[in-house]
Each structure stands twice: as structure tokens, then as C-alpha cells.
Image (cartoon, rainbow, N blue to C red):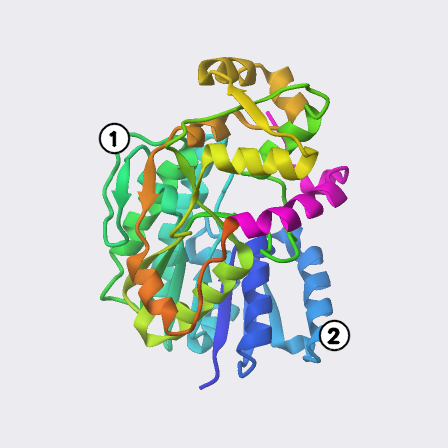
Amino acid sequence: MKPVYFFTGFPGFIANQLIKGILEKYKDFDRFYLLVLPNMVERTKKDVSEWSKAYSLPKESFRIVIGDITKDGLGIERGLDKEIEESVTHVFHLAAIYDLAVPRDLAWKVNVEGTRNVNQWVQRIKNLKRYTYFSTAYIAGTRTGILKEDELVRPPAFKNHYEETKYEAEVLVEELKGKVPLTIIRPGIVKGHSKTGETVKFDGPYMFLNMIDRLKKSPVFPKIGDPKAVVNLVPIDFIVDAVLYVSHDEAGEGKTYHMTDPNPYSVETIYSLFVSEMLGKTTKGRIPLFLLCFLLSLSSVRKGLRIEREALDYLTWRGRFDSTQAQKDLEKAGIRCPDFKDQVPSMIRFYKEHKNEERYHIKIR
């Protein structure tokens, strides 16, 4: 039986890139079902048309399914739901609210209740070979030290509602182990392509590029963050290669993976690399975190610098993700996370080329 794929979270960046990865690496498939909200149908049709042309595929290879994970049965129309349940072999659940500043009620509705609905629905799939769920490595919240893949421990606190609701959602998915063929993915902070720098949204680490760009005339760039804190950044091409491999290989069944950089750089080093590559300057001195927090508590400053206050919480966090199991299984396919330092030039180049295009920037509250 040829694979039949079902995706939530389309047309999000990671879902989009995973589908392109399948089209390029796993060509012996039957079709895709793409669950999208009504307001995403036209955009999805455009992507499907481009893929059909680029890969010489009939448009019937892609079925746009109007639905909503926050609804029972994912809001899929009757009749079509039976067709999907009887034909799908691989489910990728990526739909979520990823905004660090998201209100709790909205995050809970989509990330937790939405995942509960997907979990219930996926158990009705007749020929399911793999259910791949996208969590985040940052469900660790405020826990510090070495954080392992086989741990699912509620932390003392969370840095934001995104982390909290993704933790609660993973707890629900974990309960399915042994009931369905399942793989849980905990990626680090996903950035653009390691070689081209391509991304679709300037969030996460790109907010610091926003800040550097808007302060480029400053005579001094002080260091920021805890010297012992690290930020785990992973490029989208690594995520695509790694996730598709473990989602198709029998070794990935029943496992939870930290898809993270085993050798992450410190906050201080990353910021210095950004300043050097963008402006040719070096960082000197250090700005107290309390002062930076105060400045970003002001809406006018946040909007002016295009950076969320919640991003600062990652500048002092001292957690490190152990990815032993992921490295062991990915080694069989020769898949490794590339060195972040080597990716900085392409990341900055892409940012500079598109920084004035509003579609790349997220709304700062």
C-alpha cells in the first residue's frame, strides 16, 4: 500500500517544507490530504498548483480538506471523513499556536483541545503506519540542567503559555504510546534553511536581528544575556531530513526525540555573531537584563525594535537538551545538525534582502 499522508498545520512553514521533502525524497506515494482553515483554501490551492507543476503530478495528488482541529472530528465533512479514515497511512500533526505572547485561552483551545481532538480522530484510522506529533523541546519550561528525551516532567513553571500548552498537549499524546504507532518530535527553535537562509517569518532569533538593525547607528553594542545560557537553534532542512527519516523508519516508532543541536552556542556568542555579521562590529560591555526587561515592557519600544518581551526569557535559561537517542537513530542515515556558526552568513543575507517586506514580520503587541 502506497503512503497516504494527512497534514494539520498547513500552510505553515514546517508543514510546507515537510511536504516538499516528501515530494523530493519519498516519491512513491499515493496522495496528500491537507487540513486547512476556510481562510487558507486559496493560498493552499496556489501551493498545490505550484507543486503539481514542479513535480509533474496530477492535482488529484493533493486533496484540500476544510476543517478545524478545535472541532469534533476535526470539522471534516461527513463522507470525506470515512474516505480519509480508510486510506491514510501517515498523520503529521503540526497545527498549533506558536506565538510566545499568545493569550492562554487561545493557546489552550488550539494546542491542547485541538490535539485532544486529533488524538481521538487518529485512533479511527484503519491503516495507520505512523502518527507524528510536533511538540517542542521547550516544554521543559523553567527546568534547568540536562533534559532527556525519555523524560516528560512538569516543570516548576513555564516561561509563557506556548510552552505550557505544548507540554499539556504532549502529555495527551504520550498516552497513545502502545495504542497507535507514534513518534513525538521535540524540535529546538526552528530557523531558516542552513544554506539558503530561506524562512517565511522573522520570529524567534530574527527578532534580535530586528533589534540590531534598528540600533545599527549605535556606537556601542553591549553583550546581552547570561554567559552560561544557550539557545538551541536548528535549521529547517535538518528538521525535514530528520523528521521524515524517523517517521518512516521502524526505529522511530514509540520514541520521543529531541531534534536539537547537540552543540548549541551561548546567547552571548550568538548575539556577537549577529552583530559582527550584520554590522562588522564587536560587542563590548554588558547591558543589565533588568534594564532590557524594563525597556521592552514599554509597548512603543517593543514595536520600534520589533521584538517581543517574551523573547528575553530565553537569554538567561540554563537548560540543555540531551539528544542521544536522536543522534543514534539519525546516524544510520548520516543525518546531523549543521554547525550554527556556519549558517549565520546565509541567515543574515536572507534577512537583509527581505527585512523591508512586511509579510515576514509578526505583529508586536
Task: Classify mark 1: helix, strand or loop.
Answer: loop
**Sooner in the amino-acid sequence: mark 1 or mark 2:** 2
Q: Residue at x 72, y 73 (%)?
A: 54
- How many residues crowd around disc 1 within 10 Å: few (fewer than 14), some, or many (20 or more)? few
Rounded to the nearest angstrom, the CA distance separating label 1 from label 2 is 51 Å
Disc 2 target residue: 53
| Residue 123 figure quarter | bottom left
Report the disc number at residue 36: none
Q: Residue at x 43, y 48 (%)?
A: 188
Q: Nearer the viewer, residue 47 or 137?
A: 137
Disc 1 target residue: 156
Q: Dominant secondary structure of the magenta stretch?
A: helix
- How many residues crowd around disc 2 within 10 Å: few (fewer than 14), some, or many (20 or more)? few
Q: Nearer the viewer, residue 279 or 335?
A: 279
Quarter of the figure with the N terminus: bottom left
Q: Is residue 187 above or below residue 121?
A: above
Q: Looking at the picture, how far across and down is residue 87, in whole percent?
A: 46, 77
The amino acid beneath tag 1 is Pro
Q: Count of labels shown? A: 2
Quarter of the figure with the C terminus: top right
Q: Looking at the picture, how far across and down is residue 84, in whole percent?
A: 48, 72
Left or right: 334 in relation to 169: right
Task: Please give the range of residues in magenta.
Answer: 341-365
Q: Is residue 231 above or below residue 52?
A: above
Task: Classify mark 2: helix, strand or loop.
Answer: helix
Q: Looking at the picture, how far across and down is residue 110, in whole percent?
A: 45, 44
| Residue 154 figure quarter | top left
Does the stretch in magenta take in 250? no
Q: Is residue 100 visible?
A: no
Does the stretch in magenta take in 361? yes
The amino acid beneath tag 2 is Lys
| Residue 13 figure quarter | bottom right
